[in-house]
Amino acid sequence: MTSIQYRTQQVGDVRVFYREAGPQDAPILLLLHGFPTAGHMFRDLIPELADRYRVIAPDLPGFGQTKAPQRGAFTYSFDALANVIEGFVDAIGLDRFALYIFDYGAPTGLRLAMRHPERITAIISQNGNAYEEGFSDEWGPWQAYWRDPTPAHREACRASLSPETIREWQYGTGAPPELLSPDGYELDIAYMAREGAEEIQLDLILDYRSNVALYPDFQAYLREHQPPFLAVWGRHDPAFLPAGALAYQRDLPDAEIHLLDAGHFALETHHGEIAQRIRTFLAKVLDGGGRT
C-alpha cells in the first residue's frame, strides 16, 4: 500500500500544507477541497487512487493546516486562493494534471484552468458547481449578503459556520447515517473554532459572488477547450442540486454524469464508488482505455 506523505510548500507569504501519494512519474490528480473542510476530506480517496496516480491534496489558505497571514495582511478572496494554488502548482513543478473540484475547490480550480488550459488533462467535479441552476433555495442569506453587504447580513451568514450546521446540514443531509464517520465533521468544527476563522470564512462567503459573476467565463472555457469531464455528485446535496451536475452537459456534450445516493460530502460515504468511477474515467481519457 502506498503511504501518504505530508508536506509543506512556501508560496509567497503562505505555507501550503499538502498530502501526496503515488509514483512521482504517474499521471497527476490535483484534489481541491471545499468549505468548511480541508485536504483531510480526501483521506479515504487518496489510498484508492495512489497505486495508479500521483495524488496531491493541498489545504487552501484559511483552511486546515495551511499557514497564511492574518486577515488584513492577506485578502481572503477566491482570486487569492487561486493565486496561491497557481503558485503552489508552479513551485512543485506540476505541468499537466487532472483536477478534482469540490465546492469551493470548483471556482478555485476553474480559475486555474482558465489561466492555463494547456495544463488540464481532465476535470472531475464532485458537487463542484459552475451553473446557477445548481443553487438550491438554501442560499438566501448568502445572496442577501452579496446584494447588500451590511453588518446585519454578514451576521446572518454566521449560522452557516456553527457546529450544528456543519454536522447536521452540511454533512448529515442526505448521507446514510450508518456510513457517516464523525471524523470529518468534528475536525472541521475544530478548525472553525480557531481564532479568526469565522471572520475569514465570512469574507469568503461575501466574495463567493465573484464566482457567480465568473460562471459565464467558466462555461466559455469549457465550451472552447472541451476538457474530459466526470461528475460524481451527491444527489441529496442541500446546497448544490443535481441540476448543477447535468448543466455541464450543455457545454460539454460528452460529459459523464453520475448522481450518487449521497449528500454534499459524498466522499464520506461513497469514496469506494467514486474512486472506481475516477479510475475507469481516467484510464479511458488519459491512458486510452488502460488498466483501472
Image (tube, rainbow, N blue to C red):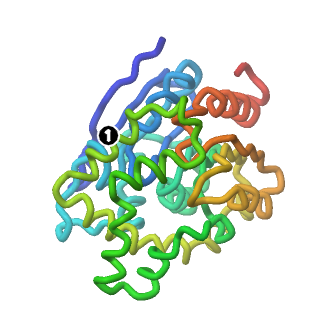
Relative to the observer, which residue lies in front, 69 or 286? 69
At x 46%, y 86%, the residue is 147
At x 18%, y 71%, the residue is 72
Relative to the observer, which residue lies in front, 263 or 49? 263
**Is 265 on the left-hand or right-hand side of 21?**
right
The correct choice, above or below, for 147 with respect to 39 in the image is below
Q: Give the residue pinned by disc 1.
A: 187
**Is 189 on the left-hand or right-hand side of 273?**
left
At x 66%, y 30%, the residue is 273
Q: Quadrant of the C terminus?
A: top right
Q: In the image, what residue type sits under mark 1?
A: Leu
- Taking the image as drawn, is residue 86 in sight? no
The correct choice, above or below, for 234 with respect to 76 in the image is above
Kind of element beneath mark 1: helix
Q: Could you tell me residue 119's position as x and y percent?
A: 57, 48
Relative to the observer, which residue lies in front, 20 or 272? 272
At x 70%, y 45%, the residue is 230
Residue most extreme to the right: 253
**Is 128 on the left-hand or right-hand side of 261?**
left
Relative to the observer, which residue lies in front, 231 or 171? 171
Q: Could you tell me residue 234's position as x and y percent?
A: 64, 46
Q: Could you tell me residue 97's position as x and y percent?
A: 56, 41
- Taking the image as drawn, is residue 216 in sight? yes
**Is 124 on the left-hand or right-hand side of 291?**
left
Q: Could you tell me residue 29's position as x and y percent?
A: 54, 37
The correct choice, above or below, for 165 with respect to 157 in the image is above
